Image (spheres, grey):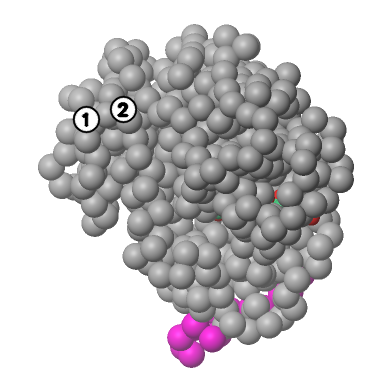
Amino acid sequence: MKVLKDILYKVSLTSTIGNMEVEVGDIVFDSRKVLSGTVFVAISGTQVDGHAFIETAIEKGAVAIICETMPEKLQGNVTYVQVVNSSKALGIMASNYFENPSEKLKLVAVTGTNGKTTTVTLLYQLFMEMGYQTGLLSTVENKINELTIPSTHTTPDALSIQKLLRQMVDAGCTHCFMEASSHAIVQERTAGLTFAGALFTNITHDHLDYHGSFDEYIKAKKKLFDELPKDAFALVNADDKRGMVMLQNFKGSGHTFGLKFPADFKAKIISNTLEGLELEIDNRQVWFRMIGQFNAYNLLGVFAIAVLLGEEEEEVLMQLSKVPGAQGRFDKIAMYGITAIVDYAHTPDALENVLKTIQGVRTGGEQVITVVGCGGNRDKTKRPVMAKIATQFSDKVILTSDNPRDEEPMSILREMEAGINPVDFKKTLVIEDRREAIKTAAVMAKKGDIILVAGKGHETYQEIKGVKYPFDDRQVVAELLNLLNKD
Ligand SMILES: CC(=O)N[C@H]1[C@@H](OP(=O)(O)OP(=O)(O)OC[C@H]2O[C@@H](n3ccc(=O)[nH]c3=O)[C@H](O)[C@@H]2O)O[C@H](CO)[C@@H](O)[C@@H]1O[C@H](C)C(=O)N[C@@H](C)C(=O)N[C@H](CCC(=O)O)C(=O)O
Ligand SMILES: Nc1ncnc2c1ncn2[C@@H]1O[C@H](COP(=O)(O)OP(=O)(O)OP(=O)(O)O)[C@@H](O)[C@H]1O
């Protein structure tokens, strides 16, 4: 049990009614999860306003209410605390409740449109290789050393973050690497966290359905850097137009990395093949298992963070060259002379990067067959753009379903088709069923060909009308290539 006044330490309060010394058993921000003796935080969300559930929360046993507007009817035995921002209050309260775990380890956030999962996973793998007890919060999985905890979000809610960090500290972790999505930053899921540093990878067209405009999306990312403590470091991609924007209001120590423009941390690509990347970093030539220019950025970012955290450069490069990287990110399945690549690319920029990477490692007359779809209930503007990119950089394209969610798969596919240049229709097929689409690609492929299955990466399901059906691109690809045994 904790005293309400203590868990409200550092929260901006507007007014209070009732006993601030009341003991609370837990913090809850969903009325459906309220138990007797808890404090309920009312948050105005994207779907509903949590303030509408204050009465229900009290009926279920909440002893204290945190809200932005005081309810008209007050109950005598309940404490009401009015705050400036409930979401922010939740983060700070959760940190106090779990005894500020982020202050007890080195916590680094990675933000940007693409490369977050890859970067934090590489950091986690690197620090584990270097012998540190390490935590990870990522889209694919959360880790406390070897223990895997399934992930529901790129960045969990504020309460879950603090709870996971507490478990990490209790398990002896000295470092944690986490993704900070723009949704999470805007919704204050990162409030109350003490960061040792943060990295900006890049920013391109995504999530405009949520943020409304590109400027708002940039502002969301920048907020993370604006709010970093003075003793933290910020590392930004110097080759991204918005890299320096992130540092504008930052008062701590700002650093840059890049392949093209002058930067504090620089790398040069020596060779880039389907087998791996050779980079020159810090006057040393190092071979890595990852493929493609974008991974040169990710690897350099990881190297720079490790150095900024005080690690020795040579040791970092030696260990980094061994790590495998994230699941479903340029995952290679080579069978019967055909190379299939499963990649999570689900934004125009990521798709273009992956396809350019494949073009860059092509050796001769092999064809590139791309299987790609776009998710339902998400940013529609990227649909025609992604189809156009797929046809631009592939010899054959099969448009198929991603996670259609509540939308009709064929209407998503028609929106994708609208972006295709008429001369490219002859190389494009539309096959709604994802398994059939992958099978067709496998049938079409000849020895030496490269099949890209884009969009779902590590996901093990396909979400159709509220139901998650088991579907793992990596398994389906391997199974179908095996079945068709091209020997
Ligand atoms: C659009 C969005 O981001 N929504 C997130 C947000 O929910 P919300 O505040 O909008 O929820 P809401 O339904 O309007 O409810 C408002 C409040 O009322 C409460 N409530 C609601 C109903 C009720 O009966 N009682 C009650 O108390 C809710 O618990 C909530 O506190 O806050 C919740 C808690 O943190 C998140 O779980 C939820 O993520 C939803 C499920 C989601 O799908 N989010 C995606 C878009 C997301 O966050 N993605 C990013 C990654 C994006 C990327 O890079 O690809 C991520 O970090 O995962
Ligand atoms: N630094 C990068 N720049 C551009 N594209 C990248 C970069 N790193 C990875 N990608 C591409 O973007 C896709 C998503 O990568 P990753 O999962 O690491 O990014 P993310 O930012 O975590 O995205 P999400 O939050 O949607 O998972 C990869 O599959 C790859 O194709």
Image quadrant where one finds the N terminus: top right
Residue placed at 74% from the left, 78% from the top?
Answer: 408
Q: Label for residue 232? A: 2
Residue placed at 18% from the left, 25% from the top?
Answer: 283
| 432 is within the stretch colored magenta | yes
Q: Is residue 40 visible?
A: yes
| 131 is within the stretch colored magenta | no
Residue in the foreground of this view, choosing between 182 and 314: 182
Q: Hey, which quadrant is residue 320 in on the image?
A: top left
Q: Where is residue 30 shown, x and y percent of the image?
A: 74, 46
Under circle 1, the secondary element is: strand
Q: Are marks 2 and 1 in contact (CB under 8 Å)?
A: yes
Magenta residue span? 418-433
Q: Is residue 137 visible?
A: no
Query: Is tag 2's residue or tag 1's residue first in the polypeptide sequence?
Result: 2
Q: Hey, which quadrant is residue 45 in on the image?
A: bottom right
